[in-house]
């Protein structure tokens, strides 16, 4: 069986990473406004959420080959290559990998066509038109050349946008293509957030301390920051003048941190237990600011008017801060003296002044993000009209 559809929405969807889930939901809600659901196929590891929330949208296992008219690398997807991994899992036998693929929904035809496509085109899926929609591009820590990616990016019939200027510079250097720069599509919150979230107030009782939400993650890359969670947990124990909620935004990878550190007050993102709006409402009700080492752990709270401090564990955190220079604070991953000063300073800012900082940063990004969706809609409409 060959998987075919009009539009293929591709991304690292399904494992349960909050940022990827938000991007998937945003793109599905956007497409749903003018494309019939049955004409959309989304790549996803666990299709349960799709079958419940978008029952007519088709699914394909991640990396299974799909032939489509239009393929969209969905909103914020990132081409990158870190310096390397630490603690790599033991290699799995070919037979076990094959069984795992079949258990996730792969067919023999997927293996065959996927192999052929990668040999012929360098990509495991095939479309007539491609969009890399507001992607992050890079970082790359070695020579990066890929003729297929260069062909996609330089084809005038394709739509290639990046979400930040650094991505644009890297793409120009690596692929020779100068892309248009918009912003992260998360700023178009109409596709994933209920307006009522903005009216939610922080819950205070008579003896309530200020509460800091701390986004922690299992980090597998550069050795210098692998032990960041140890340092963050130690910081929270040594600064007991605040309450803390530990926030896990990738359940599959991060849940082991609860037992490892004996965490009691925590919040775990689970797409099958919360809507994004419900999750954001809990955050607004319970925290005064957030310290995060995840990009969407900064973007989303800031969009919801919760101040955030970014721990610069990876380049994406710097890119996010560059988008929000007035309403977020950036520190190096182990500068905990600066972290404490920032927490004290942010908690001293009046609500009115914070609101003005949010507006100063958000308005321009919202405008850019909305414009990128307008351009994507126009591109898709032109393709479909010309093919009619």
Image: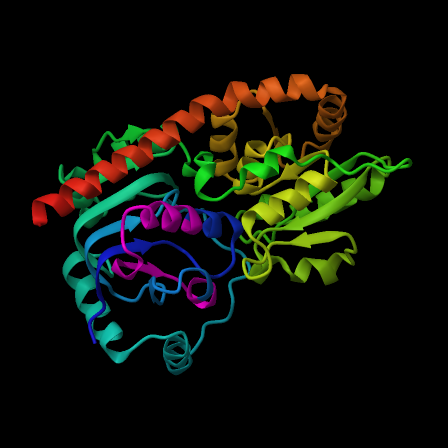
Q: Nearer the viewer, residue 335 or 115?
A: 115
Q: Is residue 182 visible?
A: no
Q: Does the magenta-highlighted stretch encompass residue 50?
A: yes
**Which residue is rendered at x = 58% and y = 58% of the image?**
270
| 234 sits left or right of 207 in the view | left
Report x, y in % for residue 369. Answer: 38, 32
Residue furthest to the right: 207
Residue range of the region highlighted in magenta in the rendering: 24-51
| 365 sits left or right of 298 in the view | left
Question: Where does the N terminus fall, quadrant-wise?
Answer: bottom left
Q: Nearer the viewer, residue 213 or 203?
A: 203
Count of picture labels: 0
| 295 sits left or right of 156 in the view | right
Report x, y in % for residue 237. Answer: 83, 44
| 353 sits left or right of 171 in the view | right
Report x, y in % for residue 130. Answer: 21, 47
Report x, y in % for residue 193. Answer: 52, 42
- The image quadrant that residue 312 belongs to is top right
**Which residue is rendered at x = 39% and y = 62% of the image?**
44
Task: Give the answer, above or below, for where 17 lies relative to 353.
Answer: below
């Amino acid at each position: 069986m060959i998987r075919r559809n009009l539009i293929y929405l591709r991304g690292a969807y399904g494992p349960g990473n909050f940022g990827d889930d938000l991007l998937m939901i945003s793109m599905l809600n956007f497409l749903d406004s003018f494309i019939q659901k049955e004409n959309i196929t989304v790549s996803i590891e666990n299709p349960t959420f799709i079958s419940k929330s978008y029952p007519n949208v088709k699914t394909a296992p991640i990396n299974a080959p799909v032939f489509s008219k239009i393929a969209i690398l969905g909103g914020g997807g990132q081409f990158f290559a870190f310096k390397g991994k630490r603690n790599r899992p033991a290699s799995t036998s070919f037979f076990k990998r094959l069984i795992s693929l079949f258990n996730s929904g792969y067919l023999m035809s997927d293996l065959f066509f996927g192999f052929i496509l990668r040999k012929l085109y360098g990509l495991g899926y095939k479309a007539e038109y491609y969009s890399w929609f507001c992607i992050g591009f890079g970082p790359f820590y070695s020579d990066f050349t890929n003729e297929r990616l260069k062909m996609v990016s330089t084809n005038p019939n394709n739509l290639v946008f990046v979400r930040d200027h650094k991505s644009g510079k890297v793409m120009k250097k690596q692929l020779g293509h100068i892309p248009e720069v918009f912003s992260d599509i998360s700023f178009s919150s109409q596709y994933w957030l209920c307006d009522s979230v903005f009216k939610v107030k922080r819950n205070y009782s008579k003896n309530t301390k200020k509460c800091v939400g701390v986004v922690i993650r299992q980090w597998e890359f550069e050795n210098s920051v692998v032990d960041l969670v140890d340092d963050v947990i130690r910081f929270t124990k040594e600064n007991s003048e605040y309450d803390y909620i530990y926030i896990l935004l990738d359940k599959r990878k991060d849940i082991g941190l609860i037992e490892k550190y004996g965490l009691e007050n925590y919040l775990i993102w689970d797409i099958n237990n919360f809507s994004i709006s419900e999750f954001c409402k809990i955050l607004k009700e319970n925290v005064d600011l957030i310290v995060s080492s995840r990009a969407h752990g900064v973007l989303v709270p800031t969009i919801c008017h919760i101040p955030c401090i970014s721990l610069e564990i990876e380049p994406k955190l710097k890119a996010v801060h560059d988008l929000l220079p007035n309403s977020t604070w950036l520190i190096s991953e182990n500068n905990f003296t600066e972290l404490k000063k920032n927490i004290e300073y942010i908690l001293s800012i009046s609500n009115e002044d914070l609101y003005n900082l949010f507006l100063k940063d958000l308005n321009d990004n919202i405008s850019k993000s909305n414009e990128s969706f307008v351009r994507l809609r126009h591109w898709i409409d032109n393709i479909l009209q010309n093919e009619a």
